[in-house]
Structure formats: C-alpha cells, structure tokens
C-alpha cells in the first residue's frame, strides 16, 4: 500500500483531497438535517397546541426572491422553511418576486394579489436587495407599513438582517440552519421593533429615492471588489488585488473638484423643528390626563382596597433644538478617498466613516484609517468618474438611468417612515434542547405519518417494508 502511494503520489494526493472534501460536505449535511429534524419536532408540537383564535396567526404572505443566492433561495426555502410553516399549521401564500419584471406588476402584487388586509404578517425571503426593492411599496401603503415583517436572510448580502439576528460565526447567515429555522419561530416568540432605512436621493436626476442599508463609495470598495473576483487565489488575492489596483487606478478624491466639501447635520433625538407633530401628541396626552383625573370626593373615600391603576408615563413638553437641521461643512486636511454609510442601532442617526488615506496592503476592515461620526444626514458631490466602479448601494453597483447620466449630488438620510420588523429571540431553541421535555411521542409520530410526514427515516422504511 505504501509503495503504491509513493509510486502514484499525485493520484493519492488528489484522492485524499477529494475524500476529505466529501467527508466534510457529508458531515455538514448530516448536521444540517439533524438540526432541521429537531426544529420540525418543535414545530409539530407548536401546531398541536390549542391557541386562542385571537392570538393565532391567520395568514402569512411569503415574498420569495428566487434569484437570491445565485438562484438557490427556492431550494433552501423548500428544504428548511416550508416544512416548519406546514407543521405549525399556518395559512401560507407564496409569491415569487423574480417573475415580476416591471413596477406596475410589483404594485399590483402588493396591493391586490396578496390581500394585505387579510394578512397577519409578511415573510421576506431574500437579502438586502430584496428589502430595498420592496421598501418603496411598503412606505406607500399604510396597511403594509403596519404589518410585522419577518426576514429570512437567504442572499449574498444581508447587512440589514444581521441587526435582527443573534451574533453568529458564519460568514453568511444562510449557512447557519438554526438561525433560518429560528426566523420561523420568531413569528411566535420574536420581538417587533421599528427600524428606518437609508434614504438616498439624487436631486439632479429624475429617479425615485433609493432605500438601502449601506452605501460604500471609494477606493477601498474597489479593492474589496477585486478581492472577491480573485477568490481562486486564496490568500494571495489580497496582495494581487492591491498591486492590480495600484497599476490600473490612480488615487482620486471621491468628491467633485468643483465642490469638494462634504456637508452634514448633527443628530437630533426629536424636536419641534424636525417633528412638529410632537406638540399635538403632548396636548392630547394632557387632555387625556385631565379627563381621567379623579374627583375630590373619590379621593376622600378612596380606601386601601381600591384598585390601583397604572400611571402612564407623561410626555415631556417638546422643545426646539437650535442645532437641528443646521448643516456643517467638513473640510478634511486631505482629499477623502472613501466613505462608508450604514444604519445605526439608534433610530435618529446614521453612522458615517470617512477615510483620506489609502493603505493598499491593509486587509483588515476594522483597522482602516478612518474618521467615524453619527449624523442626521450627509450630502456631497461625488466624482462622476469613480461612480461606475467604486459606488455600491447594498453591495451592488449603481444602475444607470434611462438618460445614462450619473448623479452630481448625493444626499443620504434616514427615511421619514419606519417599518415593523421581527427581531429573533436571543435564546435559541437549539441551545436549550437539553432542558426541554420530550419533543415527540409515538402517538404524535403516528398522527403526522397519517398526513404523509415522516420525521424519521427509520419509520418511513419500516412502513414501506410492511406495505411490501
């Protein structure tokens, strides 16, 4: 044997690599199926519970982007998400977004076909691009705006979904099967939070505002694109991309030479200047407080056994922030060569990172030389020559409009309206399975198998042998 390996060492090395890769792939698939089986048992228990009709979800619309994750989103949904929804017993309607090619068709789908008035929740299967495409239609409808949205992060880029999911060591969220399964159970044990999106407007073009979660523009963005294209070089892709960028691209400022200044405004937690409706809310709360104020005699004859009513927190008198909306001009000592903008955990500001130094052989994003700040909005005039290759919105290149004209001004701010998203519970069911009671019994297995659902392959084989 050893003589054969020494004689045919090339074939032996190839066989060893193939066997190692096959073993790792088989083990990962076995673990994934094991996790799916566990969550299927939990879903069958949840579906067997008697939930009051007022608390039961009646209908859920699944908006599935079949093109997400290079066309693999549909198969991953059928394998992981659909069995859980079926076992729980939800009325699920699936709508394919990749079959719609025009804006009118998308509007008709979201306003008529899905029947939003009959829905209890929405489920979006896709990435940042899918959310960005659906956001304008959600903001135009008061019904869709108030529906809780559950995100199943199956896509190449899921920056927004990471703020709703627990921290994971996986580079891509769809590789963590337990988090995909938890997104379904979040419909029952999740927390509804309101979050805005980035609103990117370009006044000199006729395009509508773009709603996104990230905007990257500059030379570091170009370097990261080259590194992804040269993935087959493994760790050598970093120096190769840096050398290629040095030879082919000259370092230029991201701002226009005519108007290089970048203007911004400081964040405001909410005042009369930016939210005039605060005064109406304050007056309404004061009026309700006067109406529910107890009379003189009721306060005299009040006893210890009287029912104590919970006191609602009083709204403070809104004031006007003198710094709200005032723009400041930022003139860095050097020309800015990179800007990153992304959503912050705070609903009143966005995080902006600006760099004026290019370190070609620095491959750690956290150690890039940059200046970070939180702003309410930021506005700058981009360098038109750099937009085609170095501007990414939701990690995708900016599409040209009908006139093939790139914007000469770009303004980034938070959207005026917010959407309701379902945040995943931090305590995963899989981590607590040791403390849970027995999840499945023989009677429950028999009841499921009558419907043609087999949670365990051994029972499926036994039944086939009996019929044979």
Image (spheres, rainbow, N blue to C red):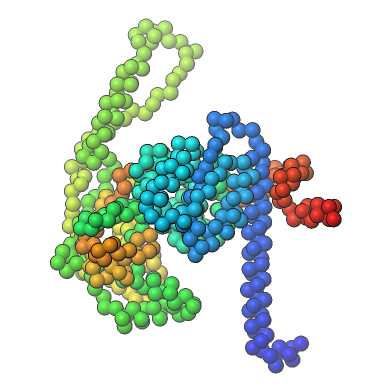
Relative to 364, is 199 above or below?
above
Res. 350 in view = no
Q: Position of residue 148 (x, y in %)?
A: 46, 41
Q: Residue furthest bottom?
A: 7
Viewer-closest of 347 and 101: 101
Identified at 67% across, 76% down, the residue is 19
Q: Where is residue 431 in the image (x, y as percent from the top left)?
A: 61, 50
Residue 351 location, quadrant: bottom left
Identified at 37% across, 50% down, the residue is 104
Relative to 33, is 349 above or below?
above
Q: Where is residue 135 in the image (x, y as percent from the top left)?
A: 38, 49
Q: Position of residue 216 (x, y in %)?
A: 33, 63
Residue 338 location, quadrant: bottom left
Relative to 420, is 334 above or below?
below
Quarter of the picture containing the N terminus is bottom right
Q: Is residue 347 left or right of residue 75?
A: left
Relative to 408, is 225 above or below?
below
Q: In this view, does 368 lie to the left or right of 434?
A: left
Disc tally is 0
Viewer-closest of 177 and 68: 68
Res. 100 in view = yes
Identified at 18% across, 42% down, the residue is 322
């Amino acid at each position: 044997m050893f003589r054969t390996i020494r004689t045919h060492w090339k074939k032996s090395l190839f066989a060893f690599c193939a066997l190692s890769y096959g073993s790792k792939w088989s083990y990962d698939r076995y673990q994934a199926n094991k996790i799916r089986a566990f969550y299927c048992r939990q879903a069958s228990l949840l579906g067997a519970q008697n939930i009051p009709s007022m608390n039961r979800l009646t209908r859920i619309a699944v908006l599935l982007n079949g093109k997400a994750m290079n066309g693999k989103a549909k198969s991953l949904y059928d394998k992981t998400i659909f069995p859980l929804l079926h076992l729980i017993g939800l009325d699920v309607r699936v709508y394919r977004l990749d079959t719609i090619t025009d804006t009118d068709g998308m509007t008709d789908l979201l306003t008529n076909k899905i029947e939003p008035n009959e829905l209890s929740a929405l489920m979006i299967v896709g990435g940042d691009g899918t959310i960005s495409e659906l956001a304008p239609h959600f903001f135009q409808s008061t019904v869709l705006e108030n529906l809780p949205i559950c995100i199943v992060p199956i896509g190449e880029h899921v920056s927004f979904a990471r703020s709703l999911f627990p921290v994971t060591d996986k580079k891509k969220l769809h590789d963590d099967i337990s988090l995909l399964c938890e997104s379904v159970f979040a419909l029952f044990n999740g927390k509804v939070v309101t979050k805005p999106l980035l609103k990117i407007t370009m006044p000199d073009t006729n395009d509508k505002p773009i709603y996104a979660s990230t905007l990257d523009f500059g030379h570091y963005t170009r370097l990261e694109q080259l590194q992804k294209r040269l993935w087959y070089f493994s760790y050598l892709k970093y120096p190769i991309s840096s050398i290629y960028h040095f030879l082919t691209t000259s370092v230029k400022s991201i701002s226009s030479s005519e108007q290089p200044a970048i203007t911004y405004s400081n964040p405001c937690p909410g005042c009369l200047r930016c939210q005039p409706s605060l005064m109406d809310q304050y007056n309404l709360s004061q009026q309700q407080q006067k109406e529910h104020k107890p009379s003189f005699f009721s306060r005299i004859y009040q006893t210890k056994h009287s029912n104590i009513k919970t006191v609602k927190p009083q709204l403070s008198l809104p004031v006007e922030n003198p710094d709200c909306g005032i723009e400041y001009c930022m003139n860095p000592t050097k020309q800015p060569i990179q800007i990153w903008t992304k959503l912050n955990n705070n609903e009143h500001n966005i995080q902006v990172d600006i760099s004026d130094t290019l370190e070609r052989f620095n491959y750690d994003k956290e150690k890039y030389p940059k200046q970070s700040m939180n702003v309410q909005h930021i506005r700058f005039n981009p360098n038109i020559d750099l937009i085609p290759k170095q501007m990414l919105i939701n990690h995708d290149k900016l599409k040209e409009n009908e006139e093939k004209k790139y914007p000469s001004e770009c303004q980034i701010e938070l959207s005026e309206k917010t959407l309701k998203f379902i945040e995943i519970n931090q305590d995963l069911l899989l981590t607590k399975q040791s403390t849970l009671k027995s999840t499945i019994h023989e009677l429950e297995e028999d009841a499921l198998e009558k419907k043609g659902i087999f949670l365990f392959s051994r029972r499926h084989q036994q039944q086939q042998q009996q019929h044979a």
